[in-house]
Image (cartoon, helix red, strand yellow):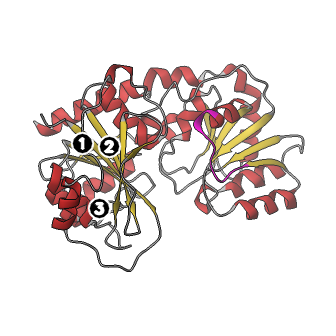
Amino acid sequence: MKPRRIVIISDFQDGEWSEHNIPSVEAYRDQWLGGLRGHSPAAAKEAGIIEVDGGYLERLPLAALKDRLVDCAEIWTFWRGEAPPSDWTAGSPFLTRRAFRMNGPEVPFASNDMLGHIAAFGAPDILCVWGLGVCEDILLTCRDSFKIYNSIDAPALRVPTEVSRHFDLVLTGAEWQSDAVKARHPDMRTEVMPIGPEFASEVTFYPLDIPKTHDVIYVAAAQAYKRHDILFDALARLPKSLRTLCVSGYGELVPELRNQAERLGIDVEFVGPPGVPFDEVNRLMNQARIGVVCGVDDGAPAILTEYMLAGIPVLANSELSCGLQYIKAETGRTASAADFHEGILDLLERAETLRPRNAVLANWTWPHSIRQLKHLIDNTKN
């Protein structure tokens, strides 16, 4: 019996570009059917012992498995070269990962390899497309799937109209994003439910009984849109005794950020890139008294509720495009770039009086979100 399957298509790419010809959809279909590209989809065994943990890509499909919305879950990414790896698992053994060869660098991404897999094994029951998206041909092949889109970052729709029109549901990070979707597709169902902060995992991030060795932590890619400059400018206006951690899984700006911190005479310790495991991120967050989110043109970053689950309140830029709904009296506060230094001082003074983890457990952990998602799928179908 064909398993009920959810597939998450991320816009992550790996591998090196190859100039060799791209095989046809039919050739890829035969490779998949012959077992040359990986195993066929199969139901997860012992679903009752699944832990919903990991990063924002993993938590939604694992929640769907745990809640028995589906019995098979996969994450699909893209490969630039001619020899993508076979399927594998990383993190949870219940979550299959597949990499598909891209036809080219153009977005939204096209892939004969992906079309061949669908031709071999059929379309998933629920198809989730994140970020830069996939070409229309893939969505047409999945016409009977329930199709969900989330841009991940600040623009509401990062795909062209001929692609976005095929989705049944668009998850957004703020009301203004829902309005933008409605402006393009007046009849499309939307819901403010960004997958990062909403499908939070209380077993991945949690308080530890360890010393607070740092005052501030910023877990963010070392890229310009994360606006480390706002944090550094604020720290330069505060006592030099304040200690800060900057943790980056990826990004090219760490050398520049180190130079900025040295020039300003502020005490900043850098961790990564490359990134560290989730348990180490949790430990680092527990070493700090508050977490910060400095970006403006940013989606609702998962770190908002991850900080909170670790027991630390959050100072967010008041101009953050998506995610300010998670900043409440019990979880932290906002401040403008000009007043960020004052926000740091105020939140440091009150940090021990707040209970941010309780707010997340009551509202935004994965059991709340998967129930809401099931309701949205049922109502949109009917």
Q: Position of residue 348 (x, y in %)?
A: 75, 32
- Which residue is depicted at the point 77% across and 55% down? 233
Which range is magenta? 271-279
Q: Are marks 3 and 1 in contact (CB under 8 Å)?
A: no
Between disc 1 and disc 2, the foreground one is 1
Q: The C terminus appears in which quarter of the rendering?
A: top left
x%, y% of residue 361?
A: 48, 21
Where is mark 3, residue-wise?
A: 134
Quarter of the picture holding the N terminus:
top left
Q: Which residue is mark 2?
A: 74
Q: Nearer the viewer, mark 3 or mark 1?
A: 1
Magenta run includes residue 273: yes
Three-letter amino acid code of the residue under disc 3: Val
- The image shows residue 207, relative to residue 279, as above or below, that is above
Query: Any mark on residue 41, and which?
Result: 1
What residue lies at 70% left-to-right and 35% top-to-bottom? 284
Q: Secondary structure at mark 1?
A: loop
- Among numbered discs 2 and 3, the one appearing first in the sequence: 2
Instruction: Out of 85 and 125, give the one closest to the viewer.
Output: 85
Please indicate whether residue 136 sits to the left or right of residue 201 in the image.
Answer: left
Q: Residues within 10 Å of mark 1 (few under 14, many from 20)?
A: some
